[in-house]
Image (tube, rainbow, N blue to C red):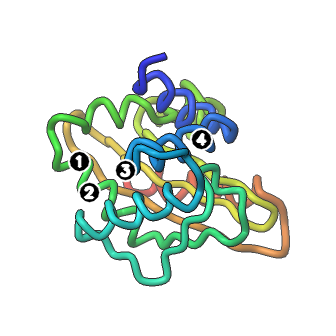
Amino acid sequence: MPLVNVVNIVNKRSDNFLAECLFKSIGAYNTMKQGNAFYSTQAINQFITDQNIYCDDVEIVDGSGISRSNNVTVKTMAQLLLNIYKNDKIFNIYKNSLAVSGLEGTLRRRMKNGYEGKFYGKTGTLNGVSSLTGYYEPEEGRYYIVSMVFQFSKKDHNYYKNIQDHIIESIY
């Protein structure tokens, strides 16, 4: 399967198994050795450093984001999205791999009521954590980078997902 197809599945559907496979493939490709979390983490950390992306307090231990040992800041995610946006070779490929508000993937039931197709993003959910990061396009060709992570011990995920959606809609 072409890499772009794998990335599309991982991003649109939030497929954790394929995310782990992709993560370990990065380590294998970079070292020409067996793919494992150690080599993958080294490769990703080097990429982040090479791209001058904020990396203080960043800890990546898996590809799916399921481990509680992962720690990625919204600043890191936003800078990564900005670097992708500035790269004409990959921006549209990456943007099109993301879930789309009101239309497809993990965002197909979110941001309806006139916001369909306006936000391209990746969701993340753990017990007590809800994140959303991506590109908001209020008008064609004009993008805002949005990245947020909520940690909580009260209420449920839907409460915080609704807040995320309202924040994005209020930008319009």
Which mark is in front, 2 or 4? Answer: 4
Q: Say which residue appears at 52% left-offset and 65% top-offset.
A: 148
Q: Look at the picture and state if 23 lies above or below 65.
A: above
Find out whether the residues at labels 2 and 4 contact each other: C-beta distance under 8 Å: no
9 vs 137, nearest the viewer? 9
Q: Say which residue appears at 42% left-offset and 19% top-offset.
A: 2
Amino acid type shown at disc 1: Tyr
Q: Look at the picture and state if 43 lies above or below 138.
A: below
Task: Give the mark, 2 or 4, whose residue is nearer the N terminus.
Answer: 4
Find out whether the residues at labels 1 and 2 contact each other: C-beta distance under 8 Å: yes
Task: Give the mark, 3 or 2, whose residue is nearer the N terminus.
Answer: 2
Q: Which residue is mark 4?
A: 19
Task: Give the mark, 1 or 4, whose residue is nearer the N terminus.
Answer: 4
Could you say where residue 47 lies in the image, as x and y percent from the top left? 32, 60
Total numbered labels: 4
Q: Secondary structure at mark 2?
A: helix
Could you say where residue 81 lies in the image, as x and y percent from the top left? 33, 54
The crowding category of the residue bearing disc 3, from other C-alpha atoms within 10 Å (few below 14, some 14 to 19, many at least 20), is: few
Q: Which residue is mark 3?
A: 172
Q: Secondary structure at mark 3?
A: loop
Q: Residue furthest bottom?
A: 56
Q: Is residue 106 visible?
A: no
Could you say where residue 72 lies in the image, as x and y percent from the top left? 52, 70
Q: Which residue is mark 2?
A: 82
The crowding category of the residue bearing disc 4, from other C-alpha atoms within 10 Å (few below 14, some 14 to 19, many at least 20), is: many
Question: How far apart in space, not on screen, are marks 3 and 1 (Cα)?
Answer: 20 Å
